[in-house]
Amino acid sequence: MTDEGRRSELAAALTEVNGRIARACEAAGRTAGEVTLVAVTKTYPASDVVLLAGLGVTDVGENRDQEAGPKAAEARAAGGTPRWHFIGQLQRNKARSVLAYADVVESVDSVRLAEALARAAEGRTTPVEILIQVSIDGDPARGGAAGDDLWRVSDSVAAAPGLRLGGVMAVAPMDWDPDRAFEVLHGLSERLVKAHPGATAISAGMSGDLEAAVRHGATHVRIGTSLLGMRNPLR
């Protein structure tokens, strides 16, 4: 496919996704400007990032450091400068590597990871925005802070000079109704904001459940398949 063909394909998908967000916001009594689209570009080339940026997408998300770093550099060299969100599970020894390109890290779920990111962020002029990944169902296999760990991690992030506590992130468990999952997340967000008034971000909702996320206060939705198409299952 030519660059122009791919641009037209992405433009059509973006129009549809933005329409879904706008309709969801209208149904929830919100304005579309309250919700930021994060285009999840994992497995897709830097050229797609550049095309999306040219179409007005301001934020992109990646979940594998080994892919995201080179892609961010390639996109930047080609003129694509979105805000980069790291949304995958992150090992502490990758903290410095991720902060070489990420503006937002959405998957912080332990004090030790927060401390590793704080060390990696020392000396930055602009703090890294951190979202605490919440475990909705408490299953450790899926990652995320559960119970009192949420408050310990958020306090650790808030105390670190190189980090800025932005809010919370979660993925609805597959065996949960999305409305129930995002209602739980919204309640935890409200508690977090009472302790940290600036931590208002709620990253929730993907291609299949963005409407439910918007109903329950999502400020960011992470959209991959509906925007970029089905991924190659071999990747």
Image (spheres, rainbow, N blue to C red):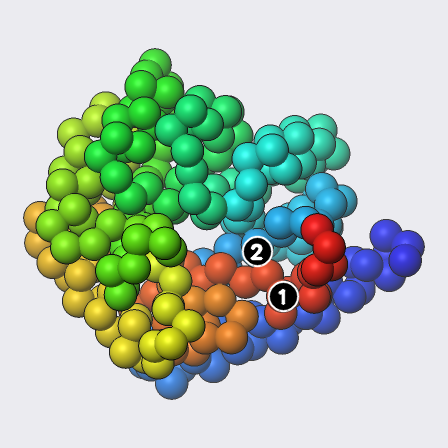
Q: Is residue 69 left or right of residue 140?
A: right
Q: Could you tell me which quadrant the N terminus lies in?
A: bottom right
Helix or strand or loop: what does disc 1 sit on?
A: helix
Examine the image and state in which quarter residue 203 appears: bottom left
Would residue 31 be visible to someone looking at this image?
no
Residue located 16% across and 46% down the image:
149
Q: Which residue lies at the image location 9% right of the left edge and 54% below the top edge?
A: 194
Residue 158, above or below 219: above
Element at badge 2? strand
Answer above or below: position of 219 versus 72: below
Q: Nearer the viewer, residue 114 or 197?
A: 114
How far apart in space, not on screen, are marks 1 and 2 (Cα)?
9 Å
Q: Position of residue 93 (x, y in %)?
A: 42, 24
Residue 233 at x, y = what percent? 70, 60
* Residue at the spot 41% in from the left edge and 33% down from the top edge: 91
Rendered residue at 51%/55% (across/down): 38
- Which numbered disc, 1 or 2, marks the residue that appears first in the sequence? 2
Q: Residues within 10 Å of mark 1 (few under 14, many from 20)?
A: some
Q: Which residue is mark 2?
A: 39
Crowding at mark 2 (Cα within 10 Å: few <14, some 14-19, many 20+): many
Which amino acid type corresponds to the residue marked 1 in the rendered image? Thr
**Tag 1 residue:** 225
Type of the residue with mark 2: Ala
Q: Position of residue 234 (x, y in %)?
A: 73, 55
